[in-house]
Amino acid sequence: YNKKESKRRLDYYCSRAAHVANEPIGALETPRKVHVYIAAPMGELGTRKARMHFEEYILPVFVAGALDYELTLVNDTETVDDVEKVVRGGVHSQIAEEIKERRRKQLEATDETGVLKMWRETIDERAKENEQRDARNKRGENPGEAAVPELGKWKPEPYPGIMDVVAIGRVTWVEAINGISEGALGSLNRTVPPLVKIKAEEQEAMGQPDKERRIDTTPVVQGEGSEAVQVTDTAGTIVESSESAPRPVTAPEPTPVVVNYDEYASQATLAGLPAVAYISHMNLTGWGSVPLKIWNFFHDQQNVDRYSSQALQVVFESTRRRTTKPELETMGSAEEALEAWEGQHMDVVVEDNVAGSLMIYDTQVDNAPFKSDE
């Protein structure tokens, strides 16, 4: 009954989303596309459960509504005292850098001197050169490997517009809002990346250890019988010695070159901010959650109602609206009461002018919820 009822409700939300997919668009209009971010939930070391949550309840609605998306999984960990821990802040930094990069390109387009465009070309050329040097270093470490491009470096064509942000879970939501605030008001200065050193050339410049002549005083017996004479060979042998090798002189690191975008920037307007959607993820972990997990197993239709209806509001672009700073701070705070959070709290840090300019999707309200006939 649970599987049948869950499928029935999911089909209901997908059928509502299909109306959006059937709407015609102009020949010059760009289809909508959203950027879905998933960070490791509290109590987890990876994004596997969050991705399964996305694929089960949210993705079918997006597909039915013909909503294109780009999925980013942020799963950074570190080992401290032999204990693996999650490193937070990946979603924050990625979103902040995307907004900053958009602001930089706007400044370059209005810069009549062309200085910023020149620096852009310089940085791009340096990045390409470093990619080639990294590939050369990798071939030097593994000569048998063919020089083929890495699949991980493939990137899709850039979206011509601004992709709205979909945050799965409270952790992702907080980092997304904080990243938008930093990207809108943070410094735009860039540092020209240093040139990657080629290991083979570096080793050649350092040179090989010098050789020294060591006297081998091992006695050698020459002759036979009574005429045998013990002779010490003082010709010596050439042996390797790293102690006598001169220490290579290391060149000083070059001074970083900073491109000052901030002197061209103006804080008068906050253009180019994406709208944000929050979709909850009530991640149940620990022994205390076992009874609720069992109950959910036999009543999964309630999860379909909760999560798929939120995904449907993202498909409906008309659900976007203005928000307030208190609403941004409390959105998804119910997740912090779960056992996985262990009493932790994440603060939303957003400036008032950013909060006043931000648009969100009203995902927590569905005007036509599913109604069972039974």
Image: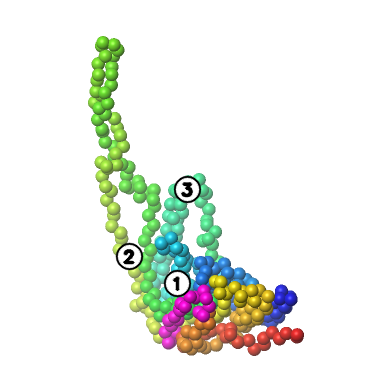
Q: Residues within 10 Å of mark 1 (few under 14, many from 20)?
A: some
Residue 187 x, y percent position in the rendering: 38, 76
The residue that label 2 is drawn on is: 256
- Let me know if residue 262 appears in the view: yes
- Tell me, for residue 356, which label it has, or none: none
Q: Residue at x 44, y 80 (%)?
A: 347
Residue 4 x, y percent position in the rendering: 73, 75
Q: Nearer the viewer, residue 310 or 198?
A: 310
Which label's residue is closer to the chain start, 3 or 2? Answer: 3
Does 348 appear in magenta? yes
Residue 148 in the image: above or below residue 301: above
The magenta span reads: 336-354
Which label's residue is closer to the chain start, 3 or 1? Answer: 1
The amino acid at mark 3 is Asn
Which label's residue is closer to the chain start, 2 or 1? Answer: 1
Separation of residues labelled 3 and 1 (CA atoms): 34 Å
Side (left or right) of 277 relative to 4: left
